[in-house]
Every structure is written in C-alpha cells, then in structure tokens.
Image: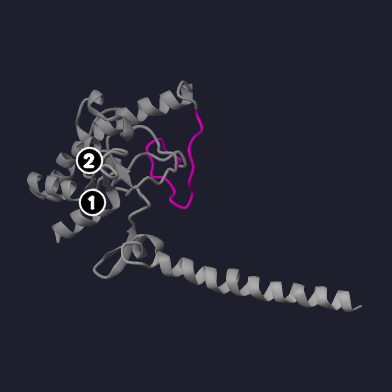
Amino acid sequence: MKSLTRQTAAGLRVLVVLTVLLGIVYPLAVWGVAHLPGLSSRAEGSVITAHGTPAGSALIGVDPVAANPASEGSLAGPSISTDPYFHTRPSATAKDVLGPGDPSTSGASNLAGDSPNLLKAVDQRRALIAAREGVAPSAVPPDAVTASGSGVDPDISPAYAQLQVARVARVTGLPLPRVAQLVAACTDGRTLGIFGAPGVNVTELNLAVASARG
C-alpha cells in the first residue's frame, strides 16, 4: 500500500512539473522568442496594412480579379486589357487554367513534367498571358505559366513583373518609370546573397500601385 502511495505521489509530481514546463513555461518561451524584434511580424502572419487596415499577408499571394475580365486576352485572339493589377503565378487549385486560385486551399497539381494535361495548361497560359500583355508568346517567362508547389506563392520573377509594367502603367495612368520604381522597391534579392532567386512580392506591389494612384 505504501509503495502504491509513493508511486502515485511521484506520478502526480511528474504530472504537475511537466504541465507547468510544457503547458506554461515552454509556450511562453516560444511566444517570447517569436516576438523578438525582427521576428514578430512573421509570427503574426506578416500582415500588410493599408491606411491602418489589414490588407493581406506578405506570405500569401492572392491573384487579383480584373473588374472587367471580358476585356482580357483570350485564346481566340488579343484584346485591349483594362486590368490594372500585377498577377501572381497560376494556381493548380484554380478552376480556370489561369486563375484566380483559392488562397484558402494550398497544393500542387502533382502532374509529371511530361504530362499532356500539364503541357496543355502551360500552352494555354502562355497564349492568354501573351494576349493580355500584348507580347509574343516567347516573351512570357517560365514562372508565369507554371504553378508553384503551394499555389499561393506571393512572389514572381522580376522578368514576369517587368512584362506587366507596360500594361499596369497604361491602365492606371501612372508614368512607366514610376511603375518600374514600384517594382524595384518590392523586389527582394537572394537569401544571404547566394540562395534562391530574386522575387517580386505581388501583394505588396499591388498595394503600392493602389497607393500611388491615390
């Protein structure tokens, strides 16, 4: 009986100690580290604000929808686009081949590189983007026609951003050099100068364009 009592008491002490350590101390330590200067923004979702109001996350790409999608380029032929936004990479979760995707759903297509369905989608995207931007299909960069692994990649290549500068400047009425400056301001270099590739955050860029329009 005494042995059982001692074992029970020891078990209760271990339970209390582990509850305090893992249920209180550890979560508080993690919260404290996450809110150190330089880390707090990412810990809170890297929220971007516009005029003091949350407008999105720098970590989640949301492809904007044009006010008049019918004016966009189509596979039947080019048209004069009135779309004032920069666009993200396509999403495999989108119902349409070019999007927009659903940011609440993340995932890749899992199609092989030689998949006929993937190659067809790439060709369709290239034709649609070329028509929208008024360029030759050969001018469309690879990241513009291939979906990211997550489907919510917030970054595009500087080449894809530059491809869209002329359209955005024309539709918004902003000077071409001004739009190019906004792209440069939203461009991040390689991680530590050597890893990855430069990227342009589309969410931040579209908010900067909206702010510049006034």
- Residue placed most toward the observer, 126 or 198: 198
Say few, some or many: other residues with alpha carbon within 10 Å of mark 1 (under 14 / 14 to 19 / 20 or more).
many
Q: In the rendered image, which residue does mark 1 sit on? A: 205
Find out whether residue 133 is within the magenta segment.
no
Question: How crowded is the residue under tag 2: few (<14 C-alpha within 10 Å), some, or many (20+)?
Answer: many
Task: State the residue position of label 2.
Answer: 161
Q: Position of residue 19 (x, y in %)?
A: 64, 73
Who's the residue at 47% across and 53% down the image? 104
For the residues labelled 2 and 1, say whether their Cβ atoms are less than 8 Å apart.
yes
Q: CA distance from mark 2 to mark 1?
A: 10 Å
Quarter of the rendering containing residue 14 = bottom right
- At 14% from the left and 40% from the top, the residue drawn is 166
> Of helix, strand and loop, which one carries label 1?
helix
Give the amino acid type for the residue marked by disc 1 in the picture: Leu
Identify the image quadrant of residue 198: top left
- The residue under the point 47% across, 66% down is 30
